[in-house]
Structure formats: structure tokens, C-alpha cells
Image (cartoon, helix red, strand yellow):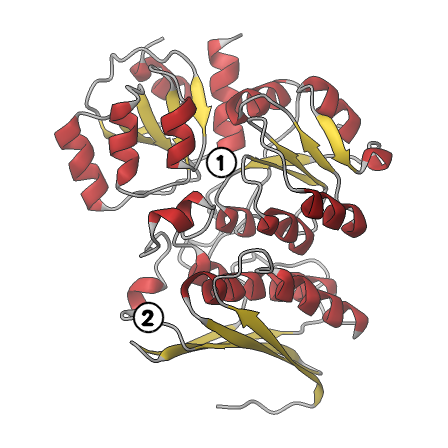
Amino acid sequence: MSLPGILRHREVFSVAGQDLEKAGTVSTEVQRVLRKLGVEPEVVRRAGIVCFEGEMNIALYTPGGRVILLVYDDRVELIFSDYGPGIPDIELARQPGYSTAPIWAREMGFGAGMGLPNMEANSDQLEIRSRPGEGTVIRAVIRRRKDDASTGGRGAST
Amino acid sequence: MTLAQVAEELRLEFLVRADPEAEVRGGYVSDLLSDVLAHAEPGELWLTHQRHLNVVAVAKLRKLSGVVFVRDLRPGPEVIQKANEEGVNLLVSAENAFHTAGKLHRLLFP
Amino acid sequence: MKLREVAELVEARFLTGGDLADRTVSAAFAADLLSDVLAMVREEGVLLITGMVTPQVVRVAEVMNLVAVLFVRGKLPTKPMVDYAAQAGIPLLATSRTMYETCGILYTHGLPPAKRKSLPHEPPGHPAP
């Protein structure tokens, strides 16, 4: 599904699997690109959070994947794709606190079952498609609003 | 101070009231099981974001006075069941770890 | 509270960013699990207190625009992490105190806890802190 709007910028980042030295660098790079393009600070912030969680999922649990950044005049889209094990039950995975993460991931500060909820909280639309054994594609849409200088995600009160 | 008194002062909600008379001899804040296993002292009240089942086993092994899940995070039914079986106190704080630890510290060392 | 006072109160040393010691810390948040940090509210001047020294901590600090990171339990980040933080302008401090003591001391001296926004599953207007 695609939305109308004028595409201003497109960039593809690759995420190495099992590389915990580099994991997280795509999100800071995405934020740098967005800032340079003059995207609103709150959108930059939300995109950074969404990207960090999406990127960590790829880095921790898959052999690798990529992040596509699409910057439109009215929104930012982040598309995460990987060839990992897939998500057997997406509705369950969306629940805060639900986690199948192994102890080693938790002991490194990850896998608390807040990844997808955080992505959801900071995007206006989050689509997840996954096939066990084949991989996962997640598309996050973050709208650019005029009042975004002061508000958070869709959970924000304003 | 007993856990029941601490719970009342800090407005903590009991999820598993195994031994409310347990003495709280300090606090420990950590989300890492290995860290708690290595460094928490008996009688300390453990504040955490971690909701893994093994939290119960670690609390029992270290003879902690209880586990407080912060930020209103609630563990799954298997965690509650295990704590009931093992006799481990489980509580919830509506406040975050910094806030809960700050208040506990001030309560124990006024 | 200034970052300098935070350092003095918990006997922390600056690993980098000592030149930014006059920055104002307006609130604190303590966690090892990084998703919990990411679930925090948008607020200026938040200090992260953590025992986690993975490279992702500094990246989260950058993504969340945190005022500084205070490592507890005597944990020290690697040199590349410190260099990265220096270049990103994020002060890093370290103390041998536990997370519990660090929170206790800073809270007692008036540093407030960071607030957070509600997530979609939570009733509006009643976010957990």
C-alpha cells in the first residue's frame, strides 16, 4: 500500500546480523540525514527510536537485513526487511512485555518485549508482515505535522 | 523495616504476598540477572524492569526480601505462579526505578 | 542541578565531557534495559543512570538527546565508546556506587524522576511514570 506525497529522499542502509559493535549506528545515521534535510526535530526523534528498535531486532535475531529510508514532504517511512526466523504470532509480539528473547540478549539490555510497542508508539502506522523461516518486513510511517515541535507519538496528549 | 511497612510507605502493590514480614535491609536496582546474582545482598529489595521467569529463581537464590517491578510493568501469570510456589514476594510500583529507589533510600536512611 | 553537582554527589568522574559540566540536569531515569529508556518521555535534560556499557547505550543517548550518561557499579565503557560520545557531545560519567545508591542520593538531593508519555495500550491521560 502506498500513500500519495512527494518523495524527497531515498536511502538504503544495510544492517549486519549478529554485529553488536555496529548495531544502532543506522538510527543515528538516519537522524543525521533527516536533520540535514530539515525534517522537524520531533519527527527526527521518533524516527530515531523506531529505527533503533527495528535495527536492533535485525542485528540481534537475524543473519542481516536492511533499512530503507523514504522522506516525503508529509511523512517519513522506514522499511525494515530481513531474512531471519520470522515472527510466529505478530499480535502476541505487539503486546508490551511479550518476549521470546534468550537470556543472553536480556543480559545485554535487550529483549524486554518493548521493541514493537516502542515502534508502534512512535509511528502513525506500523505494518508487520512475516513468514516463519523466511523473514520479516516492517513498514513504519511517521507523519510530519506542523505541531511536531512539541508533541510525542500518537500516545501524546496534544 | 518490614516489607509490609515499605510497601505501605511507597504505595507498592503486592502481586504475591508470600512473606510480608520479611525484613528489607536495603535496595538493589538492576535489570541484569547475572549482576543481581553476583552483587545483591540477602534482604535487599530488588527493583527491576526485567519480567523474565528467572527473576523469581534469582530472588530466591540471593534470599532477597522481594522483587518490585517498576513503571507499573506486570509480569506474566507464569511468573506469579512460580513466585507463589517458591515463596517469593512480588510487588509493583507505579513509579519508575529512579523514583522508587530514591524513595526507598530516603525511607531506610532518613 | 548541574552535571558537576551530580558528579560530586555520587563521587563520579567524567570519562568525557568534563567541559560540559555546567549543563543542567532536569530529571533522571535509571535502567539497564534500553527499550525502557526509549519508552521514556520527550524531555530536555534527562540523565540516564545505567549499569550497561554496550555501544548501544551511547547510541540510545544520542537518539534520545539525553543530557549525559552515568555508569554505575564501577562499569566502564570501551575507549571507542568514549571517543564516540566525545565526538557526539554526550558527557559520560562513572561511579563505583550501585544504581540504588546513586538513585537514592540524587533523589534525596532534589533531582526529580523523568516522566514518560503513555503508550497506545494505556488509557489516555494516565501514563505510568
Q: Nearer the viewer, residue A29 or A45?
A: A29
Where residue B10 is drawn, which disc sits there? none
Instruction: Give the amino acid type for the residue marked by disc 1 in the picture.
Output: Asn
Query: Left or right: B87 with respect to C58?
Result: left
Q: What element carries label 2?
A: loop
Which quadrant of the structure image shows residue C66?
top right
Query: Left or right: C113 with respect to A138?
Result: right
- Please tell me which residue is depicted at 64% across the width and 78% down the height of the picture: A75
Instruction: Give the amino acid type for the residue marked by disc 2 in the picture.
Output: Ile
Badge count: 2
Q: What element carries label 1?
A: loop
Please report, as a chain letter, where disc 2 is located. A
Which quadrant of the structure image shows residue B98?
top right
Q: Residues within 10 Å of mark 2 (few under 14, many from 20)?
A: some
Residue A70 in the image, given as x and y percentages of width and height: 64, 82
- Please tell me which residue is depicted at 33% across the width and 70% down the height of the picture: A87
Residue A122 in the image, given as x and y percentages of width and height: 54, 63
Q: Nearer the viewer, residue C32 or A21?
A: A21
Please report, as a chain letter, where disc 1 is located. B
- Please tell me which residue is depicted at 41% across the width and 77% down the height of the picture: A83
The image shows residue C105, relative to residue C49, as above or below, that is: above
Q: How crowded is mark 1: few (under 14 residues within 10 Å), some or many (20 or more)?
A: many
Residue A33 in the image, given as x and y percentages of width and height: 74, 71
Residue wearing tag 1: B96
Q: Residue furthest left?
A: B85
Residue wearing tag 2: A87
